[in-house]
Image (cartoon, rainbow, N blue to C red):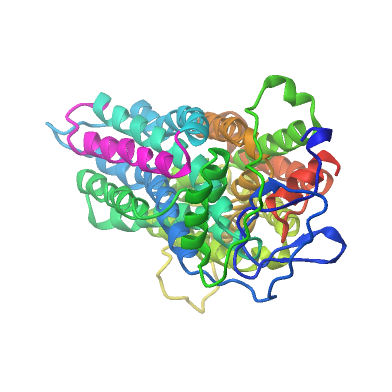
Amino acid sequence: MTPEDQEDTQPLLRPPGGRWAGGGTVAWGGASPLWLRTSRRRSPTTYPRSVPRGRRVFLAAFAAALGPLSFGFALGYSSPAIPSLRRAAPPAPRLSDAAASWFGAIVTLGAAAGGVLGGWLVDRAGRKLSLLICTVPFVAGFAVITAAQEVWMLLGGRLLTGLACGVASLVAPVYISEIAYPEVRGLLGSCVQLMVVTGILLAYLAGWILEWRWLAVLGCVPPSFMLLLMCCMPETPRFLLTQHKRQEALAAARFLWGSEQSWEEPPVGAEHQQGFQLAQLRWPGIYKPFAIGIFLMVFQQLSGINAVMFYAETIFEEAKFKDSSLASVIVGVIQVLFTAGAALVMDRAGRRLLLALSGVVMVLSTSAFGTYFKLTQGSPSNSSHVDLLAPVSMEPADPSVGLAWLAVGSMCLFIAGFAVGWGPIPWLLMSEIFPLHAKGVATGVCVLTNWLMAFLVTIEFSSLMEVLRPYGAFWLASAFCVGSVLFTWLCVPETKGKTLEQITAHFEGR
């Protein structure tokens, strides 16, 4: 904002319960305000203190979160599908070891491209239309996999679903953050990651009873449902305001937040938002959130979470478990439960505290997992093949069995730690910290960074396990988790309970 623009402001659309607080600041019990310039002489109006409980905002958030559910399913699809494709008989395509590695990793390349496309779409087509568009490659990709007769068709379908993943992972958090009011923005924003891990778990569970073709058919269901629901949802009032569509913005706000009280409309036209330009990277309000957003995505992937989820069954086979697919499902259940718990406390505990706690837990768990592999390295007696459902015996346990349970505990602790912080919060902060005019470009860069890092970690994880040994790979991840804790305390601001404008003002030093 230029100096001449720094005038007193008030919301174009006031959600029910919004009020002016003393001292000239704005305290909101409703959605993030949309701003227009007004006269300095205009007196503020006092509104009731009731907190809004518009139910349609939750329905709209659920509709948008079906996109993350779809890309969670796409991420988890490779884990049960790869074993099925390896034992497939002609004329069905059969994956070699190299093709299986690419089958798991190529989705992240498509997602990286989708991040760039999503950054372009979200500012030009809008948030709603971008979500509708991303359903096309989701359905098309799974349809190509269903009809695949050759390996290249499998990889092409995965690339298409990856493209949709990139768009959905960018647009869904932005849409939800712009329709949510501060008191529930953490809750609704965390539902993005909750739906991702739910999609992964759904793929694991369905993989028990469905072969890879029918599993791909099931993958078409969530994006199709999202297409139907999003057609009934409005565009975000913020985006409509930037397009100077005041009446449509008013109607969208009424739909989302309720219409039992009148809306206040200032007498002056909408504030003009300039497009992003590279010269603006010199501004603190741009380069600070840019750097924070990029490093959040880098640390999220360097924790090794995507490698763990893509190769969950392989990791548990290395840990000598008889039923590694059951172990993967247990991991998925833990991730869903702890992500849901994090969503419930996000607006109370705050982002920074949960990020730091998450990082500390991941440091401990990755260190313990590395220790397990170090202790069992080369031991002829470590083929214990622990059955997770076997009854507990009162006889003295074999030491190797105890070490196997160390692996289970370490993995579960890692998943739980990731789920309460570094899983949902980077995506939530990405949707909160950028100013409106730079949001498309900035979130596009962050998503591109995330998925490129996911690709590198996924494709190189097996090689890293061979070069550094499994224990070395996990100890390296532990070192990165230490870095994430330090970064959180030194650089990441708290956004709990703040409007998006207050967050932007923090970076600009106002």
Q: Residue at x 37, y 39 (%)?
A: 134
Q: Is residue 337 shown in magenta?
A: no
Q: Nearer the viewer, residue 278 or 200?
A: 278
Q: Is residue 466 visible?
A: yes
Q: Main secondary structure of the magenta part?
A: helix
**Front residue of this view, candidates 345 and 510:** 510
As drawn, the residue found furthest toward the bottom would be 394
In the rendered image, residue 8, in percent from the top left (x then y), is placed at 80, 49
Against 247, is 143 above or below? Answer: above
On screen, residue 447 versus residue 108, left or right, reads right
Q: Quadrant of the N terminus?
A: top right
Considering the image in quadrants, where does the C terminus appear? top right
User: What's the magenta region?
Assistant: 125-151
Image height of 251 relative to 485, above or below: below
237 is higher (above) or lower (below) than 388? above
Residue drawn at point x = 25 percent, y = 51 percent = 218
Number of numbered markers: 0
Is residue 236 in sight in this rendering?
Answer: no
Report the front residue among 182 and 386: 182
Residue 157 lies, in percent from the top left, at 29, 32
Q: Is residue 149 magenta?
A: yes
**Which percent across, then down, holds residue 443?**
59, 36
Q: What is the residue that sits farthest to the top in this orientation?
A: 279
Which residue lies at the image location 45% right of the left edge and 65% below the top edge? 56
473 or 122: nearer the viewer: 122
Could you tell me residue 435's position as x and y percent?
68, 39
For residue 171, side relative to residue 324 (left or right): right
